[in-house]
Amino acid sequence: MEKLLLIDDEVDVQYSFRRIFDGSDIELHTASSGEEGLRLIPTVKPDLVLSDIRMAGLNGLETLRRIRQLDPQLPVILMTAYGTTQTAIEAMKLGAYDYLLKPFDVPRLKQLVANALKAARDTKQTVAIRPQMEQQDYELGVIGRSAPMQEVFKLIGQLAASDATALITGESGTGKELVARSIFQNSRRAKEAFMAINCAAIPENLLESELFGHEKGAFTGATAQRPGRFEQCHRGTLFLDEIGDMPPATQTKILRVLQNGTFERVGSNTTLVVDVRIIAATNKPLEESVARKEFREDLFYRLNVVRVHMAPLRERQGDIRLLVDFFLRKIGGTGTHSKSIGEKTLSVLEAYHWPGNIRELENVLRRAVVVSKGAAILENDLPPEILQSVRSVPSTQASRPLSTPTSANSAAHLAQGLSTPAHPSLSASSLSALSVEAALAPTVDPAITGDIRPLVLQLFRWARLQGGIKVLPAVERELVIEALKETQGNQVQAAKLLGITRATLRKRVDKFGIRRELSVS
């Protein structure tokens, strides 16, 4: 039975609460002052506190401050008959779950109490993500353990050991500038200057001056000589972001710098020589721009010496928990305002398609930290459009068996094999009671992307979103059988297909007695 503590010095209010919650599943405790309420909290251990604001002795706001010191996660609803804008603002700043005006509507009160108790239950099930990562990983901000990010890390190391020009590609918000800075910070030029310039953000008539500088009187408004970014970055690194938007005339001068390190300021005939490493980035397919004659082909090949591709966040969902941890540390630090996050909330974040990539994830978490009413970020703290997008996915698939197109037959076989004699109608609509993740997730290496993996991940996501807590061994067994059939019983290949180790596969074979049904080598 959940416990509710009412702190109010009015006898009539206490009597009303006893009548309202009499016969319910809520155990009501009362206190007539803030001091008495604070003494009761350690012994009663309430799940929710409702406190009046205007009381003799400690008022409600001061009582809330003291409760936050005792238990940061305990939800508190403040009540008053003298509602003011400033009081409401102050209550929410102190971390109140909600603010209720007297006289209150009974159905509204019951619903608010029910919501607060549910939030308290969810908060107790939250997790504070603390993956084991090196501090320098957090400092650089390039986070990830997925297969695409491992390739990025390898290329960063190789590029850091040379002065080769690099081209970083990927959608907006994937972290291209962070990768450029990481290359710089690990290179021999790390003690020199690093400058970033967004080629799409500067007007065409000013970009050339920004890059190469100008002489006094070179154009209207040029009242003094000004060195450009190339001069300022001598012996350092210049990051040219959104280079696909660079005008043709400027492309020609950039090509010359890349070829022989020379250029002239705008309005000058004096040739200057610089030693600058260039790292460029774009969210456009430059090959298509070259084909349309919008981007110089020779410049493209000069830039594309080593290409680093940043995969969109939807293709590296295994990194979302690491990124959430990183951003919660960044946003809240390690002080009293740092937030934990609910497991269901994480499942929603992992299931969302993130069109804005990592930048969108950071903004969503910043919003959630602001609007969350307790020490934990819950599902309802996320933007409604994300919840609607994620929750609408199952309804579009509930009428047909779950399947994911792949290049191999194994996923198709598995989709058909899910309708077994024991479970003849195992479709997407009936997967709500399953949690395949509990059986397989601990053993599936996110760095491996076997042909069968898309379906496995789809099952994982579905099970998490539906809140299933029971493991269906038949699903796990079917995965192993289909993988062995697909590889003609070759355990090495079957393990690779499933994304697990051979030792793990052997344990599954023994656990499910698969040797009795298949001849495996």
Image: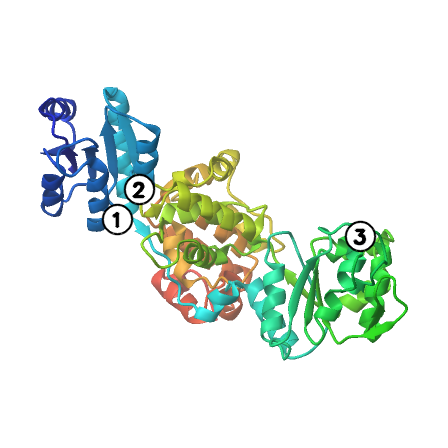
Residue 288 in sight: no
Taking depth in this image into account, of 95 and 328 the one nearest to the observer is 95
Q: Residue at x 88, y 66 (%)?
A: 268
Could you say where residue 241 lies in the image, as x and y percent from the top left?
Answer: 69, 58
The way the protein has been coloured in the rendering is rainbow
Q: Quadrant of the N terminus?
A: top left
**Kind of residue sitting beneath label 1:** Pro
Front of the two marks 3 and 1: 3
Distance of mark 3 from mark 1, alpha carbons?
58 Å
Which type of secondary structure does the marked residue at label 3 adopt? Answer: loop
From mark 2 to mark 3, how far is it between C-alphas?
Answer: 53 Å
Where does label 3 land, which residue? 221
How dense is the environment of label 1, judged by Cα within 10 Å: few (below 14), some, or many (20 and up)? Answer: some
Query: What secondary structure is found at the residue carrying circle 1?
Result: loop
Q: In x, y percent, where is residue 62?
A: 21, 41
Structural distance between the alpha carbons of marks 1 and 2 = 9 Å
Which SS class for mark 2? loop
Outermost residue, right side: 269
Q: Which residue is mark 1?
A: 72
Is residue 276 at all visible to an observer of this figure?
yes
Dot 2 or dot 3: first in sequence order is 2
Q: Position of residue 401 (x, y in %)?
A: 51, 40
Are the two marked residues, 1 and 2, in contact with CB atoms closer than 8 angstroms?
yes
Q: Say which residue appears at 45% left-offset and 43% top-offset.
A: 367
Q: Position of residue 512 (x, y in %)?
A: 36, 60
Q: Amino acid at mark 3?
A: Gly
Instruction: Please give the count of numbered marks on the rendered protein.
Output: 3
Lower sequence index among marks 3 and 1? 1
Three-letter code for the amino acid on which mark 2 is drawn = Gly
List the residue tagged with mark 2: 95
Q: Residue 282, located in which quarter of the rendered image?
A: bottom right
